[in-house]
Amino acid sequence: MTDPLAPSASAVEIATAVKAGQVKARAVAEAALARIEKHNGMLGAFTDVTAMRAIDAAELVDGKIANGLDPGPLAGVPYAVKNLYDIKNVVTRAGSKINRDDPPARRDATLVGKLEAAGAVLVGALNMDEYAYGFVGENSHDGPARNPHALDHMTGGSSAGPAAAVAGGLVPLSLGSDTNGSIRVPASLCGIFGLKPTYGRLSRANTFPFVSSLDHLGPFARSARDLALAYDALQGFDEADPAQAKRVNEPTTNRIGYPIPGLRIGVADGYFAGDAMAQAHVKVVAKALDASRVVSIPDAQAARAAAFLITMAEGAALHLERLRTRPEDFDPDTRDRLLAGAMLPAVWVEKAQKLRRAYRDKVLRVFDEVDAILAPATPMKAPKIGQKTAVFGGVELPVRPNLGIFTQPISFIGLPAASVPVWLPGEELPLGVQVIAAPWREDVCLRIAQQLETAGVCVAPVAKGFLE
Amino acid sequence: MELWQNDLPWGHHDMAYKPFDADALIDAAAPLLQLRIEPEYRAAIKANLKTASKMAALVEQVKLENGAEPAPVFRA
């Protein structure tokens, strides 16, 4: 078993050791805070460190154990959240300069409260693309988050810090958000596991929104079991999020090891085929799962286009007043897309919303044939920080909008998807594969992720320079 | 690969007869919305609108029934 104080310790290992009295939660928190102090200047993952709160929370866990009380399934597990989550007494900057003028949050985001109730220990807030509008992880106000596996490369975004913090071993667990791919893209580029649950599954209350009709929240981890443990703790209905579905909790951790031979798994073709490099990563996963079936997702290109339009328009509506009064305080890349979004003809957006429902109906029929679909999470491995264009399928195109081409058509209709990390032999950077399931079947995504991890096909090691 | 290109062709409909004029849209919509468009913003806004117009053309290529409902449904 890994030393629970080591950077590579998993959430399961830490919680087990803390509950068994082998290590104090306070010592685990202090070790995480020391790693943040040592490495964050290099990684740019954290924007706020909540050291005092972490020590208090850890001591609470230790106190419960001393009194024979159950400290929760995530006892003493350090974690951090994208800085669009409210943290009591911390300003919710959402990657922006403008929001720094807001007062500190008066309460925690619902999901922060849920992890804390499960015994986890919050250590801080994490870097992100401004207002979550980006796939690159570069922030003009806070600087870029850096990919722990190659510091001159992007983490991907917009949940850039959450991916960097986990891949760099600063914490075993983090929370991000995913509107068009912002969990799956950085998970892919940083070589970790990420879960975007079904739209409406987890409460988004007390987080700063981006595109309400597409926003999802979810966890990152270095193992499928940790991902499931966090996801289970995050479930639960919350009246404060009007988009959340009224569903009972559907735990996954207790079923994650169930064998998967009964599952029908297909590989998405056509739009999702990607180039040879992306295909090679998907093939590794497909072979391990004995997934020879090919499935077609109809109208995926139009779906991506519709998601693009809805994002522009809803994002612009959210920020309209700020665009009027403080345009110079935005990151220019964010501002100019939002300004354009404010001017979109309404009929384009209405057409996009109608397509959304029609596309959903078509894609759900695909799940009559299969239980899960495999597709690349990104069309390429991590580009270099500052890189503006890349060759996609032989054509040079802008990096920023194209990193999410394979994730957008999935989140557009709220399907649950895990990104699982694949490293080809001899390669220094990973690429993630999406395991996509029917609505409310996160358990399928997680069981497959666990199977791939057990088979050694998908691994998420702490980056080499961060093992001490 | 053509599927990923921003320079996708227009749809098979009669909108193609007239090129998308982003400047005209900006000049009409920005004052209406009380948005201040500094000269240095304009090129990037135009590029984004041009991309959006191509995305809209892609959306329009999918045939929708007259009875198609938009995704968000308000319930009183």
Image (tube, rainbow, N blue to C red):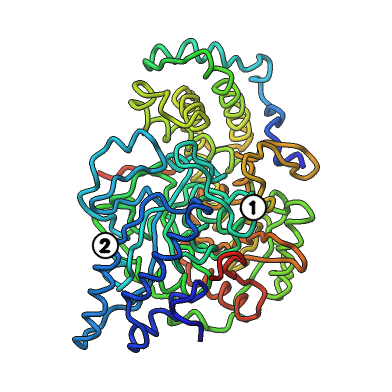
Instruction: Check chain identity for marks 2 and 1: say if they share one.
Output: yes
Disc 1 residue type (three-letter): Thr
Toward which corner of the image does residue A462 lie, by quadrant? bottom right
Residue A211 seen = no
> Who comes first in sequence, dot 2 or dot 1?
2
Tell which of A60 and B30 is nearer to you: A60
Q: Quadrant of the N terminus of chain B?
A: top right
Residue for point 53% across, 83% down: A258
Q: Position of residue A366 (x, y in %)?
A: 60, 60
Tell which of A135 and A286 is nearer to you: A135
The residue wearing badge 1 is A378
Q: Quadrant of the C terminus of chain B?
A: top left
Is A200 left or right of A388, judged from the image as shown?
Answer: left
Say which mark, if any, is on residue A355: none
Secondary structure beneath label 1: loop
Q: CA distance from mark 2 to mark 1?
A: 36 Å
Is A202 left or right of A399, judged from the image as shown?
Answer: left
Q: Position of residue A70 (x, y in %)?
A: 25, 83
Disc 2 residue type (three-letter): Arg
Vertically, is A430 above or below A336?
below
Residue for point 58% across, 30% down: B56
Say which mark, if any, is on residue A53: 2
- Disc 2 crowd rating (10 Å Cα; few below 14, some 14-19, many 20+) is some
Q: Position of residue A194 (x, y in %)?
A: 52, 62
Q: Position of residue A422 (x, y in %)?
A: 67, 66
Chain of the residue that carries numbered disc 1 in the rendered image: A
